[in-house]
Image: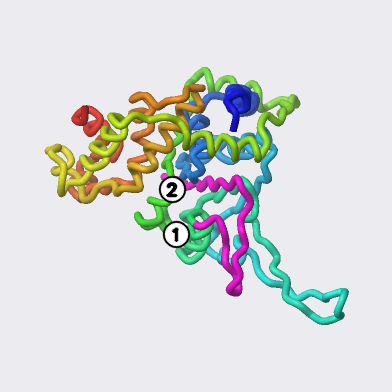
């Protein structure tokens, strides 16, 4: 890829955020982290109470990228075939015989919103997580490639846990980022009330194509990161493990820490953040700002920590203070 093409694509990223901002008011950190997930070629878990425009945010981003969008509402009776697809019996017009044809499910899209993923049984969750990891689905012994780019954004509701199936830690680790949405500020909420209760509907312009996104994903991996910063990431991740850390805080509150995949995720996401800020190399701020969404679902706390209200974000804050 030539440098001029690279610069042209990177210059469109602020325009993309501006298009999303026509519909989504505030939540800039969340928008940035979703775009970082896309640039890094991963998937993210989005957690927030109802009414914070999670679905609208994902749909708006898809529209501004001209990417095919599908929303799957996860329910207790959802089966793997409902999301992957299934074979149906059709007539072959050439031979006149009956043949089975694979009818592709909603996973065959560029951006898939898995709404309330913790409401569906483990076998359906596992079917989606296989697609996340392999970028393909297998049915009847045949592999079907998923479209590229491919981004799954799964949501879960943190306040209503009755009748849910929490994702196991090993499956949570498959998500590149665990993003938490908070309530908007007073001014932002006021603007939401003013702009969403009338007749005006903003028109979105397409900023980047699917090929542009693939080029940006290739580019993200080429961003420079120094050996010193990679060493910093390595020490940060290893310090989250109670068995090997020198941090008394982690030893006291931690059950187990992040694995090597966390370090890989932090390197990739730091590179993606650099691209999003139109830089060609990673700085320490990229790492420190992304430590929370990268590590919060990869650190498990013991019973004592949970009983005393210690959160994983608190542990990550201590790690960032302790590891220089």
The quadrant of the image that shows the N terminus is top right
Which dot marks residue 163?
A: 1
- Give the extent of the magenta segment: 134-158
Name the residue at 18% across, 43% down.
253
The answer to whether residue 267 is seen in the rendering is yes
Vertical relation: 299 (above or below) 10 = below
Name the residue at 68% across, 36% down.
209
Residue 30 image position (x, y, % from top left): 48, 32
Mark 1 burial class by Cα count in 10 Å: few <14, some 14-19, many 20+? few
Q: CA distance from mark 2 to mark 1?
A: 23 Å
Residue receiving disc 2: 175
Indicate which disc, 2 or 1, sits on the residue closer to the N terminus: 1
Q: Secondary structure at mark 1?
A: loop
Is 38 in front, or is 170?
A: 38
Callout in the foreground (2, 1): 2
Classify residue 109 as left or right of residue 99.
left
Which dot marks residue 122?
A: none
């Amino acid at each position: 890829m030539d440098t001029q093409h690279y610069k042209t694509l990177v210059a469109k990223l602020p325009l993309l955020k501006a298009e999303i901002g026509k519909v989504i008011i505030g939540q800039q950190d969340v928008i940035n982290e979703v775009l970082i997930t896309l640039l890094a070629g991963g998937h993210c878990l989005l957690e927030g109470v109802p009414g914070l425009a999670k679905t609208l945010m994902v749909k708006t981003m898809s529209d501004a990228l001209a990417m095919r969008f599908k929303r799957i509402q996860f329910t207790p009776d959802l089966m793997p075939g409902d999301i992957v697809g299934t074979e149906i019996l059709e007539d072959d017009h050439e031979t006149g015989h009956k043949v089975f044809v694979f009818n592709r499910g909603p996973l065959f899209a560029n951006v898939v919103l898995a709404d309330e993923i913790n409401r569906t049984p483990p076998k359906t969750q596992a079917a989606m997580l296989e697609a996340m990891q392999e970028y393909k689905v297998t049915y009847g012994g045949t592999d079907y490639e998923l479209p590229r780019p491919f981004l799954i954004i799964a949501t879960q509701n943190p306040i209503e846990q009755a009748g849910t199936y929490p994702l196991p830690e090993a499956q949570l680790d498959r998500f590149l980022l665990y993003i938490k949405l908070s309530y908007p500020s007073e001014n932002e909420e006021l603007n939401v009330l003013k702009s969403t209760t009338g007749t005006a509907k903003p028109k979105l312009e397409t900023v980047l194509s699917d090929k542009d996104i693939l080029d940006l994903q290739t580019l993200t991996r080429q961003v420079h990161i120094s050996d010193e910063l990679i060493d910093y990431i390595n020490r940060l991740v290893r310090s989250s493990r109670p068995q090997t850390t020198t941090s008394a805080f982690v030893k006291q509150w931690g059950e187990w820490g992040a694995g090597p995949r966390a370090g890989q995720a932090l390197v990739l996401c730091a590179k993606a953040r650099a691209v999003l800020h139109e830089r060609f190399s990673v700085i320490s701020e990229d790492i420190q700002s992304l430590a929370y969404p990268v590590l919060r679902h990869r650190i498990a706390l013991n019973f004592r920590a949970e009983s005393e209200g210690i959160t994983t974000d608190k542990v990550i804050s201590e790690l960032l203070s302790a590891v220089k």
